Image (cartoon, grey):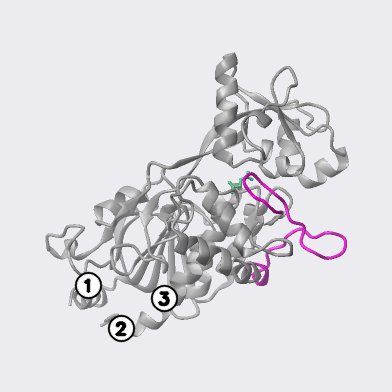
Amino acid sequence: TATGLFFAYAVLNGINLSTYFIIYDLGAAGLSFALKAAAHGHVTIVTKGAIEECNTNYAQGGICSVTYAPDTFEKHIRDTLICGAGKCDEKAVELVVRRAPELIADLIAWGTRFDKTPDGRFELNREGGHSEHRILHHEDLTGAEIERALVQSVREHPNITVLERHFAIDLLTQHHLGEFVTRHTRGLASFGAYVLNLDTNEIETMLAKFTVVATGGIARFVLPMCRHAKAMTENMEFIQFHPTTLYNPGEKPNFLITEAMRGFGAILRLPDGKEFMDKYHPMKSLAPRDVVARAIYREMTKRGSDFVYLDVTHKDPEAVKSHFPNTYDKCRSIGIDITKDWIPVTPAAHYCCGGVKVDTNGETSVKRLYALGETSCTGLHGANRLASNSLIEAVVYADQAARHTAPLLDKVDFQ
Ligand code: SIN
């Protein structure tokens, strides 16, 4: 078989051969998959920088899970479907929402600290489009906290090798054995990747039974690489905009002002102080983010201005500082005291709802090639992502993929 040929070649040539091979650049998806998969076989992670450098680090708001009444799975499902504007895959929505609490427990077991109230319950935030408080968080730095816990566990794991300064350049399929393949070729499968070692400038062949791409969204190199390997992509036209990024000309990328601040009571205002979201949606400032982003854009366009304001000055200053220390420090650094001043905000492109199409196991249309996190399109987000649904999608699908590959290990010919 093609698999046999690849692996025979690897053994004869002393090539790096792993059970699981993860092309990683961004996020909780790749790291949580590595931790689960390492229970079954050796995992090699390649990343062009350090594993700490990822988008998950910038996820301020948090991670969704139904935790306490009066919230229910049905409400979280409904909010996700409404936000997705009729384009969600209901199977993916059910799967993520119902499995979320188990995966939150795993994150806690790996050492993630979510904020709690004085009586020991989780403190739940609310963001745009959510009908209930259901967002677990760590201050306004949830992504960084999840990443800290996962990176530490990955670095300490004896069955995981991390190769930093390694850049994947091509996925291996039967094409590399001289076969002509198209996206309709039956049995099209993945065998690993060619990887550029940025220190030696040499291209190394890395073979594996299972290859996982977890490298973030649209701006990343992996999508062309997956398309070249003939993996299907889907929903690439659905770009989600975040309504409130800090208007600070010259700074790129824009600093995000978390939606949790509106969940905490912050109000959107025009330059003359008037509220305007009541004209657009009954949930006002907490409407789904596409509605809020479009409303802000409309108001900016009417006035020829580049921003509107977010006002949190009516809230207790100490509570503002303790809930949003990162945002407070950032704004302070450019002369804005958010406990006294309104924050100039503007919408910005934030997340690609589409990606490499996967099934409920995270497997792409190429056998044994998995895509996780923003790289993938599971169908959960439809045309517009509900706030804080991405981190939970990442860890649920990482778990699905680890469960799916484990019983297949012995079926992949490794001689
Ligand atoms: C935010 O904190 O507003 C971002 C959360 C998300 O996009 O999921």
Give the image location of residue 397, x and y in percent: 48, 65
Mark 1 residue type? Phe
State whether residue 201 appears in this view. no
206 and 71: which is toward the camera: 71
Residue pointed to by mark 3: 404
Q: How crowded is mark 1: few (under 14 residues within 10 Å), some or many (20 or more)?
A: many
Mark 3 residue type? His
Q: How crowded is mark 3: few (under 14 residues within 10 Å), some or many (20 or more)?
A: some
Residue sitting at x 66%, y 57%? 145
Residue sitting at x 56%, y 49%? 386
The image shows residue 398, relative to residue 303, as above or below, that is below
Q: Residue 406, located in which quarter of the rendered image? A: bottom left
Residue pointed to by mark 2: 411
Secondary structure character of the magenta stretch overall: loop
In the image, which residues are magenta? 107-132
Label 1 vs label 2, nearer the camera: 2
Residue 126 colored in magenta in the image: yes
Mark 2 residue type? Lys
Residue 74 colored in magenta in the image: no
The image shows residue 367, relative to residue 136, as above or below, that is below
Q: Is mark 3 on a helix, strand or loop?
A: helix
Quadrant in which the N terminus is drawn: bottom left
Q: Residue 6 carries which label?
A: 1
Label 3 vs label 2, nearer the camera: 3
The residue most toward the top is 304
Using residue 249 as the reference point, say whether residue 327 is left or right of it. Answer: right
What is the CA distance from the residue labelled 1 to the residue labelled 3? 22 Å
Q: What element carries label 1?
A: helix
